[in-house]
Amino acid sequence: MGKILDYDEMNDILDSLDINVIKKEKPIGYTYFGYPIDHYVYGHGKYHVIITGGTHSAEVISNVFVIRFMERLSKKEVYIDEDLYTLHFIPIVNPEGTIIVTSAIRSLIPRDISLEEEQTYFLTYYRNSYIEGDYANKYGDRDYKLQQMMFRHATPLILDDKHKELKEYLIELFQKNDLPIGCMINWSSNGRGVDLNSNIESSSFIDRVSNGEEIYANLHLNNIRRDKLGPLGCPYFKKGELEKENESLLNFYNEIKNKYDYIGSFIYHSCGNIVYYLGGAKEKNPWVNLTKEDGDDNYKVAKAYADKAGYKLDGLEIYTTMDSKLKSLFPITLLVELGGVRATPLSQFMDLDLDGSFSSFKRVYSNIIEENTLAILNALPVMLDSYNKHAI
Ligand SMILES: [Zn+2]
């Protein structure tokens, strides 16, 4: 097995976990095309924590990190006190998007590849994306993209027939919205083509989209429009409608917070090597009035995480994403951007150790897995402390 995992491989690993350690619960909900959003639980302690990955499906490393972390817990290679904590895992928040992007990956990179050969694909993809980023800066062209051309045969037709309904919808969407060739490799949205993190009432894109503005993504993705249903950025299917994945997540967070002692959550994205927390508000937060003490607590937990991971810290001040809503309504929630290299879905799986290369380029994958595992272990007690301080 290579480092990258497709949707079925992810589920195979999840199904193989020791059920005495990590138990599968009923899904927190179902997507528009009927895929379960699966939920797993570790421990039976009083203090509840939520850990999610793959909101943006192109950020495959976030699914893989969460799944590998669960696997290490299951094999007892990592230990968290199961009498003190209950960890809730949603490793695949956006199953439709994960099916789309990992099907695109498998159209080029086979499962039974050697680790060395797999690395050459990651490196090529990384370099091609950077070339296109430079070209976008220098020439501003929205031409074919090298990294998408690697995956130009990944059209909706490659989806397995077991995904018939999703496949037929995508075939029509590609035609109707004239989506760029090879863009399935950049698929971050759900199956309907809505970006779950933008699908929120306060998204800055809603008015621009409904006014008919043409909005393009940046750099090597500057041929993708965010104002149309497609690979990334589009805030809604129908104006005002919340996608099922977001509705399920909000209900789930509410349920955990109302029923139990909820102490915090970790939301995984990539990339940037950054921990975003809810800091001092410069703008007015539409959901909460944050006190200085709340901000300090958020900071403390984020710092405990960032110190161990070696990541930068950033106190959030804009409230235009679904994750900012979760951070506001369900403190203490950290959003972690895994890895210091851009170009999802493949670059974060690079694991080279080339002499003379800059540090964020070295052992990208191994560092992500190792540093973030330690960071969770370091942040949990700090999360618990700040919860208990307020519970008294
Ligand atoms: Zn993201």
Image (cartoon, helix red, strand yellow):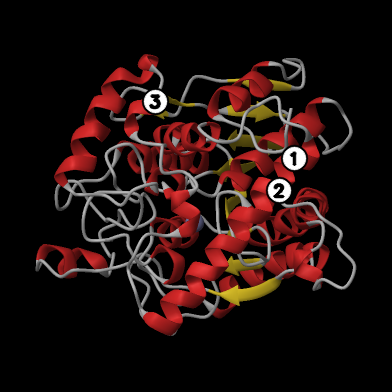
Between 375 and 339, the one lying in front of the other is 339
Check disc 2 and report its element: helix, strand or loop: helix
Between 93 and 215, the one lying in front of the other is 215
Give the Cα distance between marks 3 and 1.
24 Å
Task: Name which of mark 3 and mark 1 comes first in the sequence.
Answer: 1
Residue at position x 56%, y 80% in the image? 292
Dot label at residue 323:
none
The quadrant of the picture occupied by the C terminus is bottom right
Q: Residues within 10 Å of mark 1 (few under 14, many from 20)?
A: few
Task: Name which of mark 2 and mark 3 comes first in the sequence.
Answer: 2
Residue at position x 41%, y 74% in the image? 318
Relative to 163, say whether 371 is above or below. Answer: below
What kind of residue is marked 1?
Glu
Pinpoint residue 75: horizontal percent, then vertical percent: 85, 25
What kind of residue is marked 3?
Leu
Residue at position x 74%, y 27% in the image? 1
Give the Cα distance between marks 2 and 3.
25 Å
Dot label at residue 159:
3
Task: Tell me, yes or no, whether the two marked residues, 2 and 1, touch with CB atoms within 8 Å.
Answer: yes
Residue that badge 1 annotates: 117
Can residue 51 be seen in this snapshot? Answer: no
